[in-house]
Image (cartoon, rainbow, N blue to C red):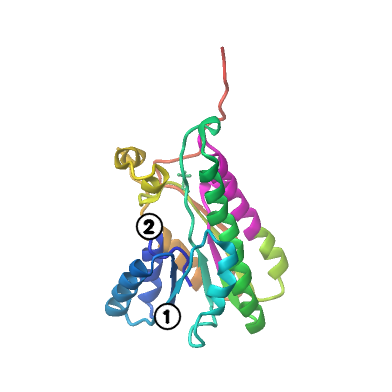
Amino acid sequence: MITGSTGDFGRAFAQRFAEIGCNLILHGRSKKKLEALAEEIRTGFNAEVELCVCDVAKAEDIPKAVAGISDDFKDIDLLINNAGLALGQSGATDAELSDWLTMIDVNNRGLVAFTLEVLKGMNARGKGHIINIGSTAGSYPYPGGHVYCASKAFVKQFSLSLRADLLDKNIRVTNIEPGMVETQFSTVRFKGDESAAANVYANTDPLTAEDVAESVFWAATLPEHFNINRIEMMPTRQAPGALAVDRD
Ligand code: 8X3
C-alpha cells in the first residue's frame, strides 16, 4: 500500500514494486488521478491494483478508508507512508498558520492514522513492514524549514519508537530520509511558482524519484530477519551545512 501515490515518489514506488508483480493498493485524494495511475500499472505490469480514496489531511477519515479495502487486498505486507508535503519557505515570522497546520495534518496526523490502522492487520498476521518517507530535513534544520523540518523529525522518531514496540512482532519499520530530489515537491512548496521550484534544482545534480524507489525497494526486499532502521541519502553535490551565526 502506497499513500500519496499519485505524486512523483508514489508513481516511482508503484512501478518499482509492480515490476516484480506485487499487487498494489494506491492511495490518494483524487480518484481521477488514481485511476489514471492504476491503468498505467495494470497495462504496463503484471500487477493487480486497488484504489483507496481519501484525504490524508483528514486523519479521522482514515480508519474507514482502510476498513473499506477489499478482502483480496486487505492483508497488507508493506505500507509505504509516502504522503507528505512542504508548504512555504519564508522565515517563521512570515509563515502562514494554515500551511503549518496542513503540514502537521498530512506529514504527521495522516501518517500515524494510516500506520495504526494497517498495523492492526500486520500484528494479527504476525508480519509486515512499514516504510516511512522521512527527510534529511528531520535531522538538519535550515532557514524556512520550521514546521516541515519538525514534522520530519517526528517521522524519524516515530519510526524508531515503533521499532521498540514491534521488536517481538516480526514487523519491520524503516525511515527513508532523502535530501534533494527533483520532483514536484518544490512546485508544491512554492505553490505553483515554477521558477522558484526550478531554482532549487538549478546547476546541480539532484536525486530522482527512481533513486529513492530503489532504496525503498532494497529495504523492503531484504530477508525478514533484516531491518533497516534509517537510510539517509543525498545527492553527491549536497551536504549538511555549517551552523549559522548572526554577527553585527
Ligand atoms: C526534502 C528535502 O532539503 O528540501 O524533504 O527539505 S529538503
Please give the name of the residue rendered at 33% of the width and 69% of the height, measured from the top-left corner. 32
Residue 77 percent coordinates (x, y): 54, 78
Q: Which residue is mark 1?
A: 23
* Residue nearer the viewer, 246 or 240: 246
Does residue 172 appear in this view?
A: yes
Please give the name of the residue rendered at 36% of the width and 59% of the height, measured from the top-left corner. 8
Residue 91 located left or right of residue 209: right
Membership of 109 in magenta stretch: no
The disc placed on residue 227 is none
Q: Label 2 is placed on what type of residue? A: Ala
How far apart are the two marked residues, 1 and 2, measured between alpha carbons?
20 Å
Marks 1/2 in contact by CB < 8 Å: the verdict is no
Q: Which residues are magenta?
A: 130-159
Please give the name of the residue rendered at 38% of the width and 64% of the height, measured from the top-left corner. 6
Please give the name of the residue rendered at 56% of the width and 61% of the height, measured from the top-left corner. 110
Q: Which residue is mark 2?
A: 209
Say which label, 1 or 2, has the lower sequence index. Answer: 1
